[in-house]
Image: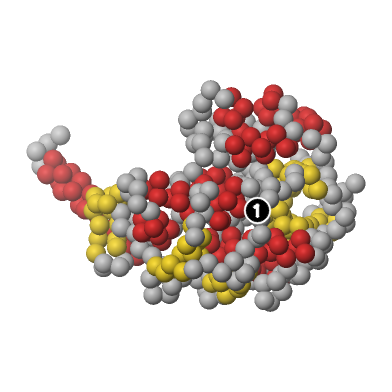
Amino acid sequence: MTKSKAPKILRYSIFSLLAFFFILVILVRFTDGTISSDQKVLLGYDEKAGRFQFFEDRVFYLNGVDGPYILGDSLIRINAENELLTESINPDSIWVESSSGIQFQLPLHERIEIPADHYSLNTRLLAISDIEGNFEALQGLLQAHSVIDQDLNWSFGDGHLVLVGDFVDRGIDVAAVLWLIYKLEAEALAQGGQVHFILGNHEILNLQGNFHYAKGKYKKLVSLIGDEDDPQDNNRLLYSPQSHLGQWLRSKNCIEKIGNQLFVHAGLSPDILKYNLSLSEINDLVRQNLDLDLYKKPNSDSIASFLMGIQSPFWYRGLVRDYKYYSKISSNELSTILGYYKADRIIIGHSVVPEVSTDFEGQVIRIDVKHGKRLNSSQSQGLLIEGNRTYKIDASGAKQSLLITSP
């Protein structure tokens, strides 16, 4: 390389690095492009303080109405002024408000019971998955198909509403979403209907105190109400056995059979058949191990490690595609699983697809979509079963046959 070329290359290199850094700073400033870990910001912009952040601890803020959270004898909520309020509990009247200002009231359940894992299906069923704290998507889907009325009350009669996991994390209305489901659960039973809440991997993460995918306002909240040095120990408070919502979530199943359909958040790996487990045994073992992070840290209990691990009903993606740990399930493997559990098909969330759709000639129905942010968005989709007809539905009120005939 000649001496005349070296300075020019050096100048170009420095200019390129500066240009890249400038573009990165602009992206961070005017988008949600913060580069960070859970606790450290490598490069970001603090909107509240109006300044850039470089290699410093993350700062979290409350962000409007949230809650309530019932911990022991205390009811905790955040008001619109970002004030943390502690109130007395009136079990007959718990008020909830979403970030959009929607309010509703509910009584606490007299007792929290473990649900059954087998149900007959003689009527309508609507299934939704992966709402992730998006209250508008949930409200829109339920109202558009007359599961709830304009006052958010159950209007589905003896129908079944199946919520196939991941209703927490990512969104800003996690508490409102959970309380609405809680409310509808009691109202459905009073009319002969049923709400089924199937646990997903994000519910498991939250029960274990992993708030990696939670909005910053939840991390700030737990830092205010917890007194532990480890943030994860504080995170566990919101869904601990001392929390009413925590007790309720901990009672739920990870798999249920309704009519001739299995409902599970992620899927069933062919390896599950090695353990000869009934649905009740799966659900009981999961409840016993909810607090153990066995995804990356399996222990000596091989069955528990499988049920909470990378091929568990919470995490397995092989019903949809090849994944880094395994290949997509084969038709024969799927048929063997369905035969073992005497089911015709399996309905799953977890793996995002462009629209509610089927695979394996209708033996798998995939319902995890990227829901819209508006109340009546056609992006928000679910599954409706009426008699022997199966439909793709959306929050605009549309209803399209999936051309599956149920026996």
**Residue at (59% x, 47% y) in the render:** 250
Q: Residue furthest left?
A: 3
Depth check: 371 or 217 in front? 217
Q: Is residue 380 visible?
A: no
Could you tell whether 154 is left or right of 43 in the image?
right
Q: Position of residue 376 (x, y in %)?
A: 64, 71
Q: Is residue 329 left or right of residue 336?
A: left
Task: Identify which residue is drawn at 51% across, 51% down.
Answer: 242
User: Residue at left 27%, top 52%?
Assistant: 57
Residue 4 quadrant: top left
The answer to whether residue 283 of the structure is visible from this angle is: yes
Disc 1 is placed on an element classified as loop
- In-front residue for pair 331/252: 252
Q: Quadrant of the N terminus?
A: top left
Q: Which residue is mark 1?
A: 112
Q: Is residue 159 left or right of residue 294?
A: right
Q: Position of residue 387 (x, y in %)?
A: 88, 56
Quadrant for residue 147, please give it.
bottom right
- Residue at position x 39%, y 75% in the image: 81
Establish if 6 lies above or below 174. Answer: above
Q: In the drawing, does residue 242 fall left or right of residue 259?
A: left
For this orientation, the residue located farthest to the right is: 407
- Compared to 363, does 170 lie above or below? below
What amino acid does circle 1 point to?
Answer: Ile
Q: Quadrant of residue 336?
A: top right
Query: x, y (%) of residue 378?
Result: 65, 66
Which scheme is used to colour this image of the protein? Answer: secondary structure
The crowding category of the residue bearing disc 1, from other C-alpha atoms within 10 Å (few below 14, some 14 to 19, many at least 20), is some
